[in-house]
Amino acid sequence: MSLIPSWFGGRRSNDFPFPSSSLSPSNFPQTLRENTAFVNTRIDWKETPEAHVFKADLPGLKKEEVKVEIEDDRVLQISGERNVEKEDKNNTWHRVERSSGKFMRRFRLPENAKMDQVKASMENGVLTVTVPKVEEKKPEVKAIDISG
């Protein structure tokens, strides 16, 4: 049984039915080569008892190339840009799979987010944004004596 989807023709990716020359970057329009979709930046959002934690895989980017912003209406915005590699006309490209260009992701944060205490860090190409949560007030329970 093949694990390749049927819409893909059941072929392995290196058996794709187009000649490799038709997929070479030199055949791409200039704007496509410079603005290849980097918008599919994968971001995980988990909620812990203390915070909302966002993790984004941004391999090859420096923290100076990434922006983390908070808007007044509780929107977290993560954006950045990976520049396209300089082309040398003497090189022959056989495959271009790494994406480049700008990306931006926006998340509306819930009411319990402490917008003034957001922290961000970047390590080994992974951006972590931590948004602390307002402590939920536990309902005060008062025991009532039963007479009789």
Image (tube, grey):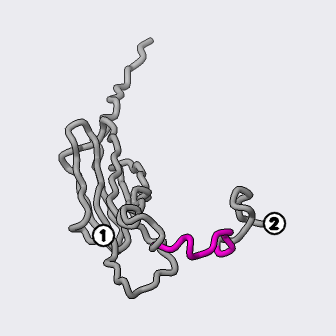
Q: In screen coordinates, is 52 left or right of 27?
A: left
Farthest-out residue, right: 1
Decide if residue 2 is in sight here. yes
Residue under label 1, please give it.
Answer: 83
Q: Pick whichever, 33 or 42, lies toward us.
A: 33
- Where does residue 51 sit, x and y in percent of width and height? 33, 50
Which region is colored magenta? 14-25
In the displayed structure, 97 sits above or below 113; it is below
Q: Is residue 110 above or below residue 9?
A: above
Mark 2 vs 1: CB contact within 8 A: no
Check the picture and name the quadrant holding the N terminus.
Answer: bottom right
Residue 70 in percent (x, y) is at 22, 46
Q: Determine the residue positioned at 30% across, 38% down.
A: 112
| Left or right: 62 as drawn, with respect to 29 | left
Would you say 20 lies left or right of 47 here?
Answer: right
The secondary element bearing badge 2 is classed as: loop
